[in-house]
Amino acid sequence: MTIRLLIAVVLLSSFIFAQQEKGVDTQTKQIRADSDRIGSRPNDVGRSFDFGKGKTKVKERLPNPLTVVARRDVLIENIMETLDEMKLIVDEASSRKSEGLIVTQPFVFAKGSVITANELNRYAILPDLNSIWTRGRYTLTIEVQSIDGIRNYVSVIAKIEGRTESGVSSEWTTLQSSGQAEEDFLRKFAEKIGINLNNESDNQK
């Protein structure tokens, strides 16, 4: 009787164990099937997208000096009009228009410690980002140099200055130009005389 009871218990245990294994295996297959369906959906978030293959439009800077086919007097006239549109005042005492040299008065492009540092960082290479900059200004020196009887070079140099405050005194410091002020003028001038500025190129990033 005891032996029969033991055999019955063993058989019952084997049956229960087999059913559990079958249930787990069935559940596992179902999970895998569901996963495969999710991975094969056309709108799967894991799918890679093509946003132009990393291409971005990069605006190249104009050459400085800029080669222009026009008479010097015409170029001087257009330079003066461009400066006027940019709200830049010509320093008549320092300029020699008959020789193709035009110098502007200092133009203040930033005031206040909140925005000056950021604006200066656009126009200049700041040596010390911890300084308290309260103003930024630049002066342009534009020169028209003849190449031959038809072509001329138009070059521009920007003198960038930033003013710092120490609480007791303030001073203007000359900074290295980043080239942005020169670029701003040359683009405005080129548009003025009708030069095609479609020089953007696709660069791989």
Image (cartoon, helix red, strand yellow):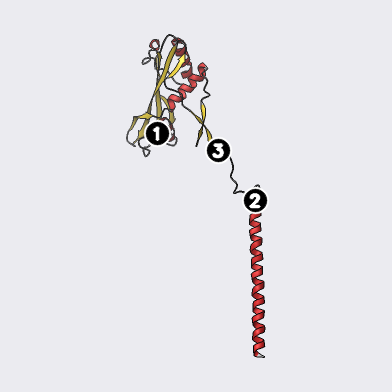
**Amino acid under label 2?**
Ser
Q: Which residue is mark 3?
A: 53
Q: Are marks 2 and 1 in contact (CB under 8 Å)?
A: no
Name the residue: 63% across, 56% down. Answer: 35
Mark toward the viewer: 2 or 1: 2
User: Could you tell which of marks 2 and 1 lies nearer the N-terminus?
Assistant: 2
Residue 62 to residue 150: above or below: below
Quadrant hosting residue 121 = top left
Q: Which residue is mark 2?
A: 40
User: Judging from the image, what secondary structure is the residue with disc 2 in?
Assistant: loop
Answer with left or right where residue 120 lies relative to residue 196: left
Answer with left or right where residue 90 lies relative to residue 49: left
Q: Name the spot of residue 175 as percent of width and height, x first.
A: 36, 30
Name the residue: 65% across, 83% down. Answer: 9
Q: Name the spot of residue 126 as percent of width and height, x first.
A: 37, 34
Instruction: Specify the quadrant that holds the N terminus.
Output: bottom right
**Amino acid under label 3?**
Lys
Residue sitting at the far left: 168
Residue 188 to residue 123: above or below: above
Give the alpha-carbon distance from disc 3 to disc 2, as whole Å.
23 Å
Frontmost residue, 15 versus 174: 15
**Looking at the image, can residue 17 be seen?**
yes
Q: Name the spot of residue 198 as percent of width and height, x first.
A: 53, 24
Q: Which residue is mark 1?
A: 134
User: Could you tell which of marks 1 and 3 lies nearer the N-terminus?
Assistant: 3
Give the alpha-carbon distance from disc 1 to disc 3, as whole Å.
43 Å
User: Judging from the image, what secondary structure is the residue with disc 1 in?
Assistant: strand
Frontmost residue, 79 versus 39: 39
User: Judging from the image, what secondary structure is the residue with disc 3 in?
Assistant: loop
